[in-house]
């Protein structure tokens, strides 16, 4: 996600064509969740455009399409769809940091055989990350260990989606009320399985509540970096209006604990509405 109705004029230049917004976003953040791929596999030409706009060290975490994960539930008859998706992603090269397998809440411990078989059919040329939403994986130690073994067999990561800050208090905005009806309510998980952990964190529309809620992740991410891991953290709020700025703040707070961490590039801020455009 690198475009949002509230970002032009704040994080992106106003009137910037949609086909150029990723380039501007990449000056704010060095990774992005590829959520749109869940709804349709993009054309190769579209992905080539992404590759042209993103710097060499940029990270795409792209979600497998819904027909693969939710409709066919990783069955072998989805393999042709998988091949088409992988071919479309080829222009990203190593910037395809991980292919993200988000599974529906009904996908439980009894389905782990299907997940194991699916992961073993995938080419080893990519890194994979799996997000589960069935409560048993978080509350049943045996189910948790079974899933970890399936993932460890192919060096795949378990992607936590931390919504605990969202559900810590009743919603106070329309965006928060909508998120309450759509987002999973699951325990926080901070255990990494691989050298490239991925975190999805959802805070609140109020900045102070979002910052307070990510405190456990400051500890986890700092520890991972000290262990030599290379984490990727995505920061969301229900309205996502200030997400790029919040992501940079999280990075700064980690860097305050770990000064050797490389800073993010300084973004080229768009001019204010009352500021004249100049050539120099």
Image: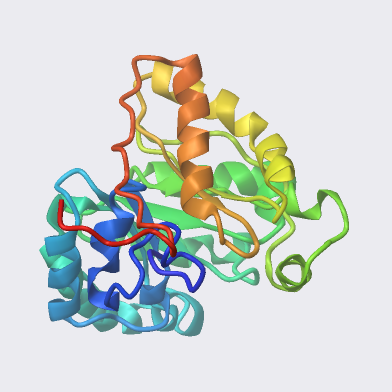
Residue drawn at (57%, 61%), measured in percent from left and top?
Answer: 240
- Picture coordinates of residue 174, whole percent (x, y): 76, 72
- Picture coordinates of residue 188, whole percent (x, y): 68, 43
Residue drawn at (41%, 67%), measured in percent from left and top?
Answer: 8
**Which sits in the foreground, 38 or 275?**
275
- Picture coordinates of residue 235, whole percent (x, y): 53, 49
**Image position of 245 (left or right of 26):** right
**Which sits in the foreground, 31 or 191?**
31
The number of numbered discs placed on residues in the rendered structure image is 0
Image quarter of the N terminus = bottom left
Q: Is residue 199 above or below residue 81?
A: above
**Which sits in the foreground, 108 or 30?**
30
- Picture coordinates of residue 121, whole percent (x, y): 27, 64
| Residue projecting furthest to the right | 170
The reply to whether residue 98 is visible in this rendering is no
**Image position of 179 (left or right of 242):** right
The reply to whether residue 134 is visible in this rendering is yes
Q: Quadrant of residue 241?
A: bottom right
**Which sits in the foreground, 203 or 123?**
203
Q: Quadrant of residue 209?
A: top right
Residue drawn at (42%, 84%), measured in percent from left and top?
Answer: 67
Q: Is residue 69 above or below residue 172?
A: below
Residue drawn at (69%, 52%), measured in percent from left and top?
Answer: 163
Q: Is residue 64 above or below residue 122?
A: below
The figure's colour scheme reads rainbow
């Amino acid at each position: 996600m690198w475009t949002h109705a509230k970002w032009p004029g704040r994080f992106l230049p106003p009137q910037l064509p949609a086909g150029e917004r990723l380039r501007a976003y990449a000056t704010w953040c060095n990774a992005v969740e590829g959520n749109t791929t869940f709804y349709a596999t993009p054309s190769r030409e579209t992905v080539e455009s992404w590759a042209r706009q993103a710097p060499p060290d940029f990270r795409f975490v792209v979600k497998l399409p819904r027909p693969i994960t939710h409709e066919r539930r990783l069955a072998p008859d989805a393999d042709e769809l998988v091949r088409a998706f992988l071919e479309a992603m080829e222009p990203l090269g190593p910037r395809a940091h991980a292919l993200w397998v988000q599974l529906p809440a009904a996908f439980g411990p009894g389905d782990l055989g299907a997940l194991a078989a699916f992961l073993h059919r995938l080419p080893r040329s990519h890194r994979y990350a799996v997000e589960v939403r069935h409560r048993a994986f978080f509350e049943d130690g045996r189910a948790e260990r079974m899933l970890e073994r399936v993932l460890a067999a192919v060096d795949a990561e378990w992607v936590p989606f931390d919504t605990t800050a969202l559900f810590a208090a009743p919603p106070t905005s329309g965006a928060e009320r909508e998120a309450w009806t759509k987002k999973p309510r699951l325990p926080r998980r901070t255990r990494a399985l691989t050298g490239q952990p991925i975190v999805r964190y959802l805070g609140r529309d109020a900045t102070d509540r979002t910052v307070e809620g990510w405190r456990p992740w400051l500890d986890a991410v700092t520890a991972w970096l000290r262990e030599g891991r290379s984490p990727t953290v995505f920061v969301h709020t229900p309205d996502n209006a200030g997400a790029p700025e919040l992501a940079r703040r999280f990075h700064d707070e980690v860097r305050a604990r770990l000064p050797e961490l490389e800073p993010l590039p300084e973004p080229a801020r768009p001019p204010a509405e009352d500021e004249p455009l100049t050539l120099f």
